[in-house]
Amino acid sequence: MQLLQVEKLTKHFGGLTAVSGVDLEVERGEILGLIGPNGAGKTTLFNLISGTFAPNAGKIIFNGESIGGLKPNYICRKGLVRTFQTVKIFPEMTVFQNVLMGSLFGSEGKSWPEATGQAREILDFTGLSHLSDVPAGSLTLVNQKRVEVARALATRPQMLLLDELMAGLNPAEVAEAMELVTRIRERGITIIMIEHVMKAIMNICKRIIVLHHGKKIIEGTPEEISTNKTVIEIYLGEEEQAHAGS
Amino acid sequence: MISFINILVNGLLMGGIYAITAVGLSMQYGVARILNIAHGEFIMVAAFLTWMLHTTLGINPILCLAIVGPILFVLGYLVRHYLFKTLKEKTPSPAAFEGNSMLMAFGLLFVIQSLATYIWGKNIVGYDFMRYSVYLGEIRFAANRLVIMITAVIICFLFYLFLTKTRTGKAIRASSQDPDAAALMGVDINRMLTLCFALGALMAGFAGVLLSMEYKLDTFMGMGHTIIAIIVMVLGGLGSIPGSLVGGFILGIFYGIVSGIEPGLTEAAYYLLFMLLLLFKPSGLFGR
Amino acid sequence: MTNLSMTVKKNIPYIAISVLILALLAAVPFFSKPYTVVLLKNILMFAALTLSWALFSGPTGYISLATAAFYGVGIYTAAYLGKVLPLPVMVLCGGLASFLLALIIGAITLRLRGIYFAIFTLSSVELIKQVLHWFEITVLGTRGRPVVKISNTTVYYVVLLIVVLLMVTTYFLKRSRYGLAMSSIGSCEDAAAHIGINVTWVKVLTFALSSFFIGLTGATTATGLIYIDSHIAFDLNYSFFPTLMAIFGGIGNVFGPVIGAAVFSYLREILITRFPYAYMIIFGAVMILTILYLPNGIIGLVQTIKDKVLGGKDATASSRKVN
Ligand SMILES: Nc1ncnc2c1ncn2[C@@H]1O[C@H](COP(=O)(O)OP(=O)(O)OP(=O)(O)O)[C@@H](O)[C@H]1O
Ligand SMILES: [Mg+2]
């Protein structure tokens, strides 16, 4: 059965249609890649699925239940959690407290010791134990991103949405992040990841979706995507333009 | 019919003063990100200075624009240079800066208001300037209101030209729209923000001079004008001068209508309008 | 809740000192002049308002300027119900009325963040004041009302009780799960919402709880006013003062707001009659200086000095933040 089904999802911002009639299906246990040039509507799609914004039209069905338009806290408790393109952690809290927040509030009726134990386990899993008493705001970008992922994992999700986890990381850090993503999948967590780092997405994902101007252009395996003419034109073309421009 | 036209004309006459009240605040918040709650205090100081100049030295209030305006400009410059600039250096997060600068402006409000009360006392003061009636068909109003409105519109227009046509004006707008790009192009952002705040105070100065020609003054008048300025700013959209003008005229007409129905509730209506705007159209009627 | 009992144990010296101070304060009416009782009553009143303000605005970072609205509701409750209800019931009614008003204002302002919330709450005070003023004059044909007088000593004890309740509530709330949720909103509201915290609910409820205490304080202290009208009851200074006092004292722990309130209400007592303008000038200037140079208030300063002297490693000075 599909874990997530999205039908004809649409979001307008004033005159602009950021997401336009997008259909999407995600199998339990898979890692789905989401790519597209800047401003394609990828983050907006995440915002709709995770409840940051309510969609203007369309359906979002998670685990057989319609979640379109619900507040993010309810969606999180149903087992769907996301990270942000610009890191959103609790900077004054320690790394441990950040993760504890996830385990305390991410699911109902957890006792304090249970939550603490779970937070420690997640810190281990994400390789952050040695930083657990450091204020999260003082960490480097990679580690802040890791804290955000750890906090999301601590909510015990079935599905995790990762928004540009690897942006701004150096090649070694990208490799580590890729390894982390694979291990998260091995825990049985389904993942959708937005990524501009092509190497990462081509390696990890079995299936990739390309968005352009808010529309789903094509969907396929990494090989199909990387050889597809339209994709090369719209996506890689604009990338080059951007590079030439800057 | 006459009464409707009356309301309209009176509203338009009020609109000019409302607009110029808002333009300064709109600059300060729209560009320098300082919600200057003490804006009305600047206006009050300017109004009292004009009153003093007129009653003791007999200087024509219109002339006072050229005297009081620059004084307020300097005051604004000093305030931003010594207070808000320091705060900005100490508060890196923009959101925290907005909150703290608003609180600091409250501190400023207390200081200015109390100093003014100490100097000028608690009495209501005022002077007469062109208080005779003029007629427009059947509609009668005081000549000074017409002068105030026209002067206000001219000042707003000149200020608009300054912002859109001169190098400095363009640099200010660039600093507000895309600070990083502006900095890359060699604009000294910090100086621009200070200039901008000072220009906001200059506008408050003009507003104060014009206000004193028609209204009675007391040292506690500031808050009301700050609220009007915020309403007009929100109506017209941040940092937009044409927006402030339109917003000013809309509020003027709104004033005319409400005071025609129930004068006792005019102020309440302002606050209600403002709260509704904040809730439903915080980006302004003409905002994106 | 082992966590909690541990914190309590760690803080035994502070608790002991607090209990001692409390005992002293409770004994004051027995051995001191009536004037001292009035002075302390005023200080305690501002301490109550400041603590209430900090209860909500401290952790969430939302600057509320509606304190005067809830205080005014308390005052009007006393004016209307003071004659017909016994003091404790009347005071509770004041608290509940403020609680309800806060639920309404809170529910309306949910979508507002940062300074928009601040100016909205400020306007709500003015709106209530103006409408009430108009209503009294045009509909009731009166302006203002007398308030039943109650002995200063009684009022003193009730306000003291409110302050103690507030300190205990703040202390335990901060260390509870709910308190964590509150500070996560101040830290990063979007993140808080996305990890399962019902930010709406937490904000509105805390706002209402803080207003409940403000209402209690208003209803209690109104009994010392003799006569009230909308301009006395909904005086914006009751929004500004607690905010400034809290910022000056620091909101890092429960003592900050109390210190801020004590310093300024004492200054006020000695200056307001003889040099009223000097008081407001000092007040404004100190506020500016505090925001510039003491971002964590007096408490933050003490903490910094303590850390320097002791070289303590767990510097958990929390900073003031704004959404
Ligand atoms: N809150 C918002 N209000 C108005 N417009 C928005 C908002 N969020 C996004 N947009 C607009 O919607 C479009 C899609 O933005 P989105 O952030 O989803 O793109 P993206 O694919 O994530 O791009 P990037 O790769 O740069 O992150 C853009 O044109 C953006 O300006
Ligand atoms: Mg994006």
Image (cartoon, coloured by chain):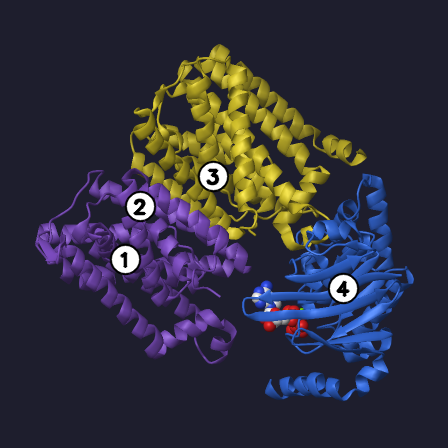
Chain colours: A blue, B purple, C yellow
Q: Which residue position is annotated with label 1? A: B15
Which residue of the protein is positioned furthest toward the top in this rendering? C30
Q: Earlier in the sequence, mark 1 or mark 2?
A: 1
Q: In this view, does A212 lie above or below A69?
A: below
Q: Is residue C263 above or below residue A83?
A: above
The chain to which mark 1 is attached is: B
Residue tagged by mark 4? A6
Number of labels in the image equals 4
Indicate the chain on which mark 4 is placed: A
| Mark 4 or 1: the one toward you | 4
Q: Which chain carries label 3?
A: C
Residue C66's disc number: 3
Confirm or reject: label 2 Cβ below 8 Å from ligand 1: no
Circle 2: element type: helix
- Callouts 3 and 4 close, C-beta under 8 Å: no
The residue mark sitting in front, 3 or 1, is 1
Residue type at numbered disc 4: Val
B230 lies above or below C64: below
Tell me whether the residue at label 1 lies in contact with that at label 2, contact meaning CB atoms closer than 8 angstroms.
Answer: no
Residue type marked 1: Gly
Image side of residue C3 versus residue C34, left or right = right
Quadrant, the N terminus of chain C: top right
Observer-side mark, 3 or 4, equals: 4
Q: Are marks 4 and 1 in contact (CB under 8 Å)?
A: no
Question: Who is closer to the viewer here, C294 or A223?
Answer: A223
Q: Can you tell which of label 2 and label 3 is closer to the viewer?
A: 2
Per the image, the residue denoted by label 2 is: B258
Asked if marks 2 and 3 touch (Cβ < 8 Å), the reply is no
